[in-house]
Amino acid sequence: MDHAAAATLPDAHPDHLDTSTGVDSRKLAFWTFIGSECLLFGTLIATYMVYKGASRVPPYPHDTVVNGQAYEGILDIPLTSLSTFILLMSSVAMVLALSAVQRGDRAWGRNWLIITAALGATFLGFQVYEFNHFYHAGLKLSTNLFGATFFTLTGFHGAHVTAGVIYLLTLALLVHRGRIGPEKSITVEIAGLYWHFVDVIWIVIFPLVYLIR
Amino acid sequence: MSTTTHTIPAPAAAPGPAPSETGLWSWITTVDHKRIGIMYGVTAFLFFLIGGLQAVLIRTQLAVPENNFLGADVYNQMFTMHALTMIFLALMPLTSAFFNYIVPLQIGARDVAFPRLNALSYWIYLFGALFLISSWFLRLAPNVGWFAYANLTEPAYSQGVNVDFYVLGLQVLGLASIIASLNFIVTILNLRAPGMRLLRMPVFTWMALVTSVLIVTAMAIFTIAVTQLLFDRFFGTMFFDPSKGGDPVLWQHLFWMFGHPEVYILIVPMLGMVSDVIPTFSRKPLFGYNVVVFSGILIAWLGWGVWSHHQFAVGLGPIAESFFAVSTMLIAIPTGVKVFNFLATMWGGSIRFTTSMLFAVGFILMFTIGGISGVMHSAAPADLQQTDTYFVVAHLHYVFFGGTVLGLWAGMYYWFPKVSGRLLDERLGQIHFWGTMVGMNLTFFPMHFLGLYGMPRRIFTFSADLGFNGMNLLATVGAYLIAISTLVLTWNLVRSWKRGQLAGPNPWGAPTLEWSIPSPPPDYNFLEIPTVRSRMPLWEEDSSKQGGIPHGRAQEGMDTITLGGTRVAEMEFPDEPSLMDPSEAHADHIHLPPPSYWPIILGFGISLLFGALIFRHVTGPLHNLWYLSFVGFVTTLVGIFGFALEPGHDH
């Protein structure tokens, strides 16, 4: 929602209209934060790419032949494709949540926020399963470079999703209690920025880690 | 557009510092940018004194050959901690102190965009700094250089907790810098007074913006690099361990991708400070404002593409080395442009050599020497000869001391009256200046020769027959002279805080907004938010300077930024938006955010979360203290909710 639309709402809080750029300060801060986050993730992704194929001992991510011996890849692409789809769908729910909050629909604002969080939590469930499976297949942080780079990168992303789920559930509670109405929908919008960012980063990670050999 | 200027000269019956709360609790819970600025300044100055003490101990060890005053191990800790203390605990936070105090005043704002976040970054900084410095008092300090090159930092080669202090301490301190910089970026972009277009901002504010952008980008890379090192040391990964396939050169790249922008983080704010100091004491507007601003942006931009000139000795191959050699040479251009702009500003001005101006001129001279020896490093073949010698030590101290520190002192003498309401003593100031100038050149100039004669860095002693004796003794004498001069400054600060000569709102006849309000400013800064019509609002009425005041080339109501004749950006800017309610003209109605104790709780939680991990590598009963890390985690969670849901704060 842009500020022009906000101005037409009856109890629009005028604070964020008074800034020099016209952009709400919290929103600007969040965009800057996202810029910083891009470099955090960028560094992890770059490290992953630099060390791709540099592991000296199995398990390897993809089917590999080393010294004539074949090793089966450990990554489960169909399974992760499914969890990726679920995470992307959560972004749709996030858009609907914001829309509901903006038009003052408390029930659906709350519901869509809970659905977004639930989809995020499902993605996390897949990740917990995957990490657990890898652990039992002999891949730990200390096993090889694939383990080190894979767990730090996807784990860092998972931590962001976890924070996002808590964030969204908190907002759902606030919307439910009527503490976030249309006049404060910017709060939900900013949470949406964060959530979409976490999704977009996964869209970068998924092909680089899972699809490209 | 109205014809009157709304800058408010201090009324005769200025309320002065409003009857604001005093006492420890009010400082712990404060969210006022001015108080936070003072806390940053005092804390960082104390760390500056500690860093100086470390330097004096280093020079004492090196005064004579075959000395065993410190011994090799303590010496390693000493030079590592000298760098870490000066860079992360003293100089960056000192610039942060100026950003905090001065920037909102220069743009006509009542506070920063996120006052509580500002307090949070201070508390994280304080706890992180205490954590890191405690290692030095325990004689367990990091001993691998501030660059902490792999694979020396791997657990196999650095046992014990020394490197852990580095990893955990910098993790926490980096977070503080990123949070603070997010805040400054939003403050500068969003809280400008009406009419304060981007190209009307004082250059110091501009450079604060540029520096903050550098911090949020560079610090992010470093945060991950340190996290990877943390995982190597605590969780058995092998990011930088070549015996398991890791690549130590990756650490070098990640470190210097942060480390080189860090150099600019430490110099760009001072380029801004002297850009404000020199016009004031030359009684002339800054020569080539736009060029100075865009040079600053260009320095920061190019600063991103030069990091590997720190790694010429690694052998990156001719293509990489050529690229980084050329990009390094390029940086000399915008830097040189600034120097000439400063000179042209002084040219024909009626110069007053106050202590502040002396330091600004000293800054130009010394920083230029440091810049020239810096360009010498850009030639990769020559750099191979200079790598790891005292030539590099000489260069970096001409930049950090001749640039950063002298620039800081110029700013200190300039803005101290605004902060305290009292002038620093000029006679002590002159002693401080000349002692510092003579001292620094005695200390660092001979190091150029020592380096070219082959004296290596980071070696705790040298043998008597190498021909290094005389110049090392000279350097030590100079270091003591700097130390004595710094004590003079310390005495000056302490004495003038309560007993200095009263300054009044604008003791220097300076042109920018911070000088339009009483010294020290009231809690709300501006009784009425001023409307800005030029770059030098306080000089508009002065006919002697009227001809030269540039107003910026922007059209009315629109900020157009052109680069090489092409329009690159445009920003709408209504000339007189009604930023404030008329009722706010009375001080009682000015809404200021209430104090909050959540920043210190959250800051403590985050610091404990990382800091307590140190006990994982301690044996004996203390080992179990690492579970405090979980306490820190819970405190952080509670802190975040308390912070976010606190009533009375929108953000």
Image: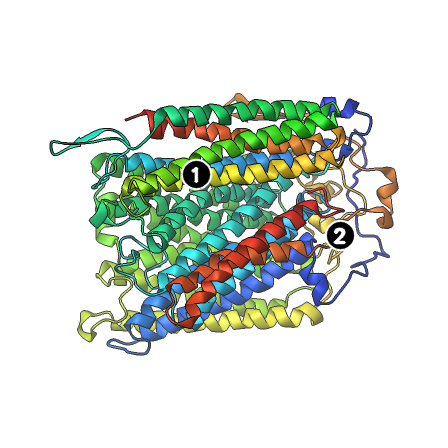
Q: Which mark is residue B9?
A: none
| Residue at which label 2 appears | B594
The residue marked by circle 2 belongs to what chain?
B
The nearer-to-camera label among 2 and 1 is 1
User: Residue A56 versus residue A71: which sits nearer the camera?
Assistant: A71
Q: Residue at x 43, y 70 (%)?
A: B622
Residue placed at 32% from the left, 31% from the top? A75
Colouring scheme, one of rainbow, by chain, secondary structure, one colour = rainbow
Look at the picture and state if B258 lies above or below B404. above
Quadrant placement of the N terminus of chain B: top right
The reply, left or right, for residue B136 in relation to residue B2 is: left
The residue lying toward the viewer, choosing from B96 and A1, is: A1
| Quarter of image, res A23 | top right
Q: Is residue A52 above or below residue B404?
A: above
Mark 2 falls on what kind of element? Answer: loop
Q: With B476 as the anchor, is B449 left or right in this view?
A: left
Disc 2 marks a residue whose amino acid type is Pro
Q: From the viewer's side, name the closer residue of B65 and B433.
A: B65
Percent position of residue B456, x then y: 24, 62
For the residue carrying disc 2, how many other residues have a C-alpha within 10 Å: few (<14), some (14-19), or many (20+)?
Answer: some
Quadrant containing the C terminus of chain B is: top right
Q: Inspect this view and state whether residue B414 appears.
A: yes
The subunit letter for the residue under badge 1 reads A
Would you place residue A129 above or below residue B400 in this image?
above
Dot 2 and dot 1 residues touching (CB under 8 Å): no
Quarter occupied by residue B356:
bottom right
Residue that label 1 marks: A128
Q: Can residue B508 be spotted in the picture?
A: no
Looking at the image, residue B179 lies above or below residue B534: below
Residue B102 position in % (x across, y down): 64, 51
Relative horizontal placement of residue B495, taking residue B85 as reference (left or right):
right
